[in-house]
Amino acid sequence: AFTANVREMYQNCLDAGLNTVIVQVRPYGDSFYPSEYFPWSYYAGGAIGRDPGFDPLQILLDEAHSMGLTFEAWVNPLRLMLESEITSVSAEYPVRQWYDDAEKRAENLISYGGRLYLNPASAEARQLVCDGVTEILENYDVDGIHIDDFYPSSLPFSYDADSYAASGSSLSQADWRRANITNLVGEMYDTIKAHDPSVTFGISPRGIVEQDYDLIYADVAYWASHEGYCDYLAPQIYYGFEHATADYASVLKEWSNMTTASGVSLRIGLAAYKSGSTDQYAGSGSTEWTESTDIIARQIDLSR
């Protein structure tokens, strides 16, 4: 039944003229494949750590390639399960071992809003992310690795003040966080290219550059202008042409002007899901998506 559903999904992609699928394989420090480092996802087996009895990633990958689709494995690098769920994770996995060890917990994990996150200031935590990527690359013939999200948005400085102090960094805490994320991205890129230079590494940041920089500490302008961090950026420019504060054309131009590294291409993420809906954050442009039927088509034309 899973295979049949995947085939139907991919046929929809082909019918829409798409050539690539970006498939989530690790949403919450868990996995849609048998992993040495992460427990089975609730979404795979119905409970954290429960083996579904088959390999969803292998089916998703094989069916994509059989239908001529490029397949990128989408990983959320830092976000983990809810803290209330950690006791459901077997002690064989690093995140549970770290949680149970007060010293390792303080060094490698951040707890915020009831959810756990890997602490990118920790070399050990960043290595776990890279080990997880290596595991995928060694066991599955994926065409790319794709990531989004970094620090939880607007994380108060108190949550990693101890890590910052222990680092002895001369940077401000905000710049230190940005350096941590840039280190993570660079290490992931190096990990991927060491395995196979033809495997692409893509990052999908927020559409508004200032939010990436100030809220989730992703220095996208640096990655866009320097080689060695990603092969493409796919900003989530999920705004209409009439958005009151972030209209599509202006945001697109900013990203286009900013992406100058010869090894970095720009691929635009579009909000097809907004078609026919009111955009409550668009101010005076809130009804644009209900009044126009060709927004996505015009956005594709402009991006090209």
Image (spheres, helix red, strand yellow):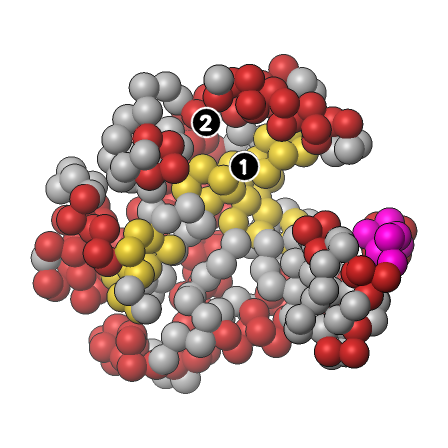
Look at the image and give the residue range highlighted in magenta.
292-298
Q: Amino acid at mark 2?
A: Leu
Residue 293 inside the magenta-drawn segment: yes
Q: Quadrant of residue 181?
A: bottom left
Q: Nearer the viewer, residue 273 or 291?
A: 291
Asked if marks 1 and 2 touch (Cβ < 8 Å), the reply is yes
Query: Residue 207's spot in the image, x, y percent?
Result: 66, 65
Q: Nearer the viewer, residue 263 or 255?
A: 255
Q: Which residue is mark 1?
A: 23
Mark 1 surroundings within 10 Å by alpha-carbon count, few (fewer than 14), some (14 through 19), many (20 or more):
some
Q: Nearer the viewer, residue 162 or 295?
A: 295
Q: Quadrant of residue 157?
A: bottom left
Q: Amino acid at mark 1?
A: Val
Residue 36 in the image: above or below residue 96: above
Q: Which residue is mark 2?
A: 57
**In the image, which disc is placed on residue 70?**
none
Query: Residue 6's spot in the image, x, y percent?
Result: 56, 24
Q: Quadrant of residue 152?
A: bottom left
101 displayed left or right of 77: left
